[in-house]
Image (cartoon, helix red, strand yellow):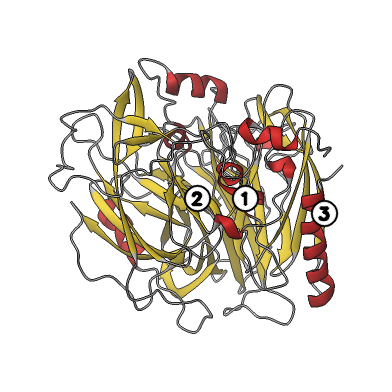
Amino acid sequence: MISIFLIGCILVLSGAESALGVKTRYFKWEVEYVFWEPDCIEHPVMAINGQFPGPTIRAKAGDIIHVDLTNKLSTEGVVIHWHGIRQAILSFQYIGTPWADGTASISQCAINPGETFPYQFVVDKPGTYFYHGHFGMQRSAGLYGSLIVEVADGEKEPFHYNGEFNLLLSDWWHKSVHDQELGLSAVPMRWINEPSSLLINGRGQYNCSLAAGTCKFTGREQCAPRVLRVLPNKTYRLRLASTTALASLNVAVANHKMVVVEADGNYVEPFEVDDLYIYSGESYSVLIKTDQDPTKNYWISAGVIGRKPNTTQALTILNYQSVHGGKLPASQPPVTPSWDDYARMRSFAEKLRTLSRSYLPRPPLSHHHRIALLNTQNKYGGQTKWALNNVSLSLPATPYLGSMSYKLKGAFDPTPPPESFPGDYDIMVPAANSNCTVGNGVYVLPFNSTVDIILQNANALSANTSEVHPWHIHGHDFWVLGYGDGKFVEGNFNLKDPPLRNTAVTFPYGWTALRFVADNPGVWAFHCHIKPHLHMGMGVVFALGVERVQGIPGQALACGLTAKLFMNTKF
C-alpha cells in the first residue's frame, strides 16, 4: 500500500496532468545482480529488469515520471538519483518532490530488500540527463541509465538536426564494489586503482584491441560496440553523459568537428571543437555533420584525462550507410590529448556561455551569502579521508529531510560546518597537520537567498599532487562564474552569460566560483561526483526552506529516528 502522504502528492500531480495536458509515464523496475560481460569478461553487474545499462527513459518537458522501484538485491538497500532533475516547484499546480531525489540518508531511507518505493516527479526542462544509484558504491556496480527529456509539444530546439544518438560513458572494474568499499576504509587505504576498461553504452573491451581487430564478438554481443549508423550529408545530435565513477574523459569523432549546443540540460552558445572534455556527472549535446567520405567508417573515441591513464580508450564506430557496419576504419583512432594539459581543459570549460536567445536566467549581480570550501585529503583514525574545511562528511542514519521536517533532536550534529578556511593556508603543499574531523552538520541557507560557493583545490597528502574534482549539486543549477589558478582572489566574474550547470570541475591547485539561488525547498547534497571521493567524505549538505516542504511520504522516512513516526503505517 502507498502512504496517505504519497496519495496526496499523486493527486496534486494528477490534477496538474489533467489541467495542463501533460503525460504521466509509468515504469516498473526491479534491481538485481545478474552476470554480464561489459568488457567481454563476465562479472556481476547491478541491472534493472535484467538490462545493463538500465532502461532509457524518454519523456517530454513537463511530463510526470512514475517509477515503482523494487529492490530484489538480497542483502543491500538501494536508491536511484535522477541526475540533473531538480525535483522543483514549477507552478501552483506542481508540488516540489525533494524526497524523490534519491539520495540515501539525505532525501530518503534506502529501499530495503523486497520493498518497492514509488518515485514520482516532473521533468521540467528538456535536456540530456541520466540516473544512477546513490547508495554505497552501487553506481560503480552498473546501476545507471539514460534519461532523455525532449522539448514539450509545440516547442522547438534552438538548433536543427536530422537524427540523434545517445552515448552513456562509464568506467568498469573487475574488482567488486564490495572489495573497493572495504579497501577505501582500510588502514592503510587500498586504492581502487584505474578502471579495467571504459564503456560506451555499457560496452567495452578488455585484453583485446578493437582498433587492431583482435576482438572477437561471436557469441559475445554484450561487449560488441554499438555502431552509429548515419546517412551522408546530414546533421546528427550526439547526447553525451558521463556516469563514470573515477575517470575524466576526452571524446572525439575522427575527421568530424563537433558543435557544442547543450551542457547539463541548458542551452549554450554553439562553438566548434575537435574534441570534448567531459567529467563525471556532466552531460552535453553536440552536433556533427556527416560530410566526410561516405565510403569509409570513422572511430568515436573516449580516453582518460586528468589522471595518468592506465586504461585503453573506449571505441565505437560512426558507420556511413553505404559501408558495412563491421568494417573497421582504416585510420587509427583519435589520439587523446595529454592527460595533464590542464590549460587546454580549462580553455574548453571557459568557452561555455549561456545561449543569448534562450529563456535561461542570468545570475544575480551580487550574493547574500558566500561559502568557501577548501578541498583537502586528510587522515582520521588512520583512515584516508577527503574533507571540506577540515570536515569529512559521514551521513547519518536518519534522512535529513525527515529529521529536519519533524525537528528531531540527536539525528545529526546541529553545529553547522565552517564556512571558510584560514587565509594563510598554503594550498601548494601538504597540510602541516593532516588530521581532520568527521561530521554530518548542515549548511542551512536562507530561502531565496543568492549563494556563492568558492571551491578551492589544494595539495593532497602526497607532495606535488592535486587532483581534478567535478562537483555536482542536487536540486538546483548554478552559474559557473569563473576559474582561476592558485588561491582564490576576488576578481572579475562573468555575470553576463556564464553557463548554467549542475556539475562543474575544479582543476589542480585552482579554484572555481559558483553562484545559485537557494529557491528549491528541501535538503540537497553537493559533492564531488568521483564515487570513491564521495565515499571518503568529499561532500556537504545544504538545507533551505524545509518548513515549506509538504506531503513527504512516510515510506521515504521509515528508518532511523523517524521510523517510530511511521511504525503503524502500512506502505
Q: Residue furthest left?
A: 424
- Which of discs 1 and 2 lies nearer the camera? The answer is 1
Label 3 sits on residue: 7
Q: Earlier in the sequence, mark 3 or mark 1?
A: 3
Front-most of residues 207 and 379:
379
Q: Is residue 142 found left or right of 313 in the rendered image?
A: right
Q: Residue furthest right?
A: 1
Q: Position of residue 462 (x, y in %)?
A: 22, 29
Assess whether mark 1 and mark 3 are in contact (beta carbons under 8 angstroms).
no
Q: How busy is the neighbourhood of tag 2: few (under 14 within 10 Å), some, or many (20 plus)?
A: many
- Which of discs 3 and 1 lies nearer the camera? The answer is 3
The disc labelled 1 sits on which kind of residue? Asp
Assess whether mark 3 and mark 2 are in contact (beta carbons under 8 angstroms).
no
Label 3 – label 1 distance at C-alpha: 18 Å
Residue 101 image label: 1
Residue 568 image label: none
Label 2 sits on residue: 281
Quarter of the figure with the C terminus: top right
* The image quarter in which residue 468 lies: top left
The disc labelled 3 sits on which kind of residue? Ile
The disc labelled 2 sits on which kind of residue? Gly
Q: How busy is the neighbourhood of tag 1: few (under 14 within 10 Å), some, or many (20 plus)?
A: many
Q: Is residue 158 above or below residue 208?
A: below
Front-most of residues 345 and 266:
266
Q: How busy is the neighbourhood of tag 3: few (under 14 within 10 Å), some, or many (20 plus)?
A: few
Label 2 – label 3 distance at C-alpha: 32 Å
Q: Earlier in the sequence, mark 1 or mark 2?
A: 1
Q: Earlier in the sequence, mark 2 or mark 3?
A: 3
Q: Residue at x 60, y 57 (%)?
A: 129
Q: Residue at x 40, y 39 (%)?
A: 538
